[in-house]
Amino acid sequence: MSHYDYDLFVIGAGSGGVRGARMAAQAGARVAIAEEHRVGGTCVIRGCVPKKLFVYASHFHSDLEDMRGYGWTVDGATFDWRTLRENKDNEIDRLNGLYLKNLVGAGVELFEERATLEDAHTVRLQKSDKTVTAETILIATGGRPFVPDIPGAELGITSDDAFYLDELPKTIAIIGGGYIAVEFAGIFKGLGVEPTIHYRGPQILRGFDQDMRDGLDTALANRGIHVIPQSEPSRLTGENGRITMETRNGNTVQTDMVMFATGREAHTKGLGLESAGVTTAPSGAITVDEYSRTSADNIYAIGDVTERVPLTPVAIAEAMAFVETVYKQNPTPVDHHMIPTAVFSEPEIATVGQTEAEARTSHASIDIYKSRFRPMKNTIAKRDEQSVMKLIVDGASDRVLGVHVLGPDAAEMIQMTAIAMRLGATKADFDATMALHPSAAEELVTMREKWQPAEAEAAE
Ligand code: FAD
C-alpha cells in the first residue's frame, strides 16, 4: 500500500471522472473524487441529457402540425415552459442521485467542493481548507462555455443558463454556428420562440459534410429558423428588457435575449497545473499522450479538458482506457477513429467516418452515392422536407469511408452503421445486406447508382 492518502484522486465528477473513479475503485484502488458543482457533470446536468429532453419537447410542435394529415386534430394545445423545466429538473435530480449512489456504492470518497493542485501528488480542497495526497491524479474537469470579450457580453446567456430560464423570450439571437447553436435554435423554435442564428462564417456546421450542411440550411429556412451568415456581434446594450446587438458589419439587431454558443474552453484556469508540472496547449487544454498521461508522470487527464473529441462517450472510453492502463496492467490507448456523432436539429444530422472533402484529400479515387427523398411520414403530412443520405466509398478498396444522414432518426441509424464501419464494411457488404422495408434506413443499402455531379445537377 502506498504512503499517500489515496491511490487515486479524481478532480471533476462528470462523464469521464465518475467512470474513472468508479472503475478504479472496483479494481481495488483507494479512490477519492472532488466535484465543485453537481455530480454528473456537463452531460447530465447541463448538456446532452437535458438538451435531448428539450429536443423531445420541441418536436411536439411539428408533430401537432403533421398529425392533421393523418386525421387527428387536437384543439387548444398549449405549452407550459415551467412544467417542462420542472420535470426536466426532477429527472436530472434522479440521475444525479443515481451517480452519487453508484460512486458511494463503489467505495469512492466524495468531496463536494473545488479541488486544485499544490504539487504533483497534493490536492487542495478549497471548502474543507485541507490538503490530501494521492499516488495518481486524474484530471477530468471538462470544459465551459467560451464567451467573446465584447462590451455588454454579460447581457447574454450561454447554454448553461438556457436550461434554467424563468420565462421563455419571444425572440432570441443565437451566436455561433456549431451543433449547440443549431440544436438550441430548433429547441427554441419548437417551444414557440423566434430564433435567429448569427454566425461569423459563411455557413453553419463547419466540418460536417457539405450535402448535410446544405440540406439542413434548406430545412431550417423552411421551418422559419433564420440563419444570418457573416454576422458577428461587436457590442450588446440593454434597455427595458430588450437587447440591442451591434454587429461587426454594421447591423443593429433588437432582440429579447442573446445566447452565446461560441464554443467551449478547457476548464483549467486556477487549477494549479504549473505547480504540478502539467503542460497545456495555448488554448488552455491539457496535452496528453495516447494513454491520457500528461507531462507529469503520475497525472492523467481525460475528457473535454484535453481537447481531443469533446463528446461524452469519448470521455467515458478514455476513463476506461485509463483504468485498464493504470490499474489492470493492460496499457490501452484510446481509438479516436470512426466516432459517430449527431446534431439533434429537426431534422437530425448524424455522421460517421470521413466527409466527402476529407476523403477527396486522403484517397486517390472515391465514389459517392447519394439519395434525396421525402420521408414517407412527410407525404400525408404534406411536409415539404427532404432527407439526404450519402455514402463515400474508396474507389480502390470498395471500403465505405463515410456515411452521412440528414433526416428523422439519423442518430439511431448511424449508431448501428458505425459498427459496420469499424468492421471495415465495403459497399458490396452494404449492397448484400437485405433492406428492412418500409424504413428510411433501407436507403443506405439500396443505393446502386454512383453520383455523377454533372448529370445530377442537370436533372435537378
Ligand atoms: P464534464 O462532464 O464537463 O465534467 C467536468 C466536471 O468537473 C464538472 O462537473 C465540473 O463542475 C467539475 N470541475 C471542474 N473543475 C473542478 C475543480 N477544480 N474541482 C472540482 N470539480 C471541478 N456530448 C455528447 O456526446 N452528445 C451530446 O448530445 C452532447 N450534447 C451537449 C450539449 C451541450 C449543451 C453541452 C454543453 C455539451 C454536450 N455534449 C454532448 C458534450 C458532453 O457534455 C461532454 O463531452 C462531456 O460532458 C465531457 O465529460 P468530462 O468528464 O470531460 O467533463
Image (cartoon, rainbow, N blue to C red):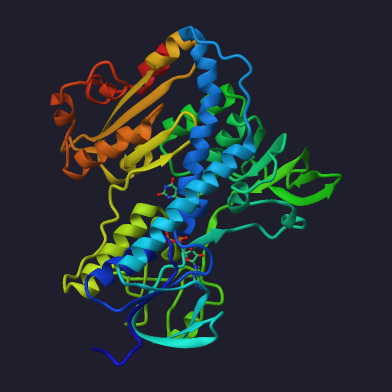
Image height of 192 relative to 38, above or below: above
Residue at the right extreme?
240
Q: Nearer the viewer, residue 194 or 15?
A: 15
Residue at 44 percent of width and 78 percent of height: 279
Residue at the bottom extreme?
3
Q: From where the camera sits, is residue 296 visible?
A: yes
Say left or right for 357 vs 240: left
Q: Nearer the viewer, residue 123 or 257?
A: 123
- Residue 348 lies, in percent from the top left, at 44, 32
Asked where in the image residue 452 lies, by quadrant, the reply is: top left
- Residue 409 lies, in percent from the top left, at 37, 30
Asked where in the image residue 148 lies, by quadrant, the reply is: bottom right
Quarter placement of the N terminus: bottom left
Q: Nearer the viewer, residue 185 or 123?
A: 123
Residue at 48 percent of width and 80 percent of height: 273
Say left or right for 165 vs 440: right
Q: From where the camera sits, is residue 178 visible?
A: no
Residue at 25 percent of width and 19 percent of height: 449
Say left or right for 451 vs 303: left
Quarter placement of the C terminus: top left
- Residue 306 lies, in percent from the top left, at 41, 65
Say left or right for 34 vs 153: left
Image height of 225 relative to 88, above or below: above
- Residue 126 lies, in percent from the top left, at 55, 80
Image height of 63 relative to 268, above or below: above
Asked where in the image residue 61 lies, by quadrant, the reply is: top right
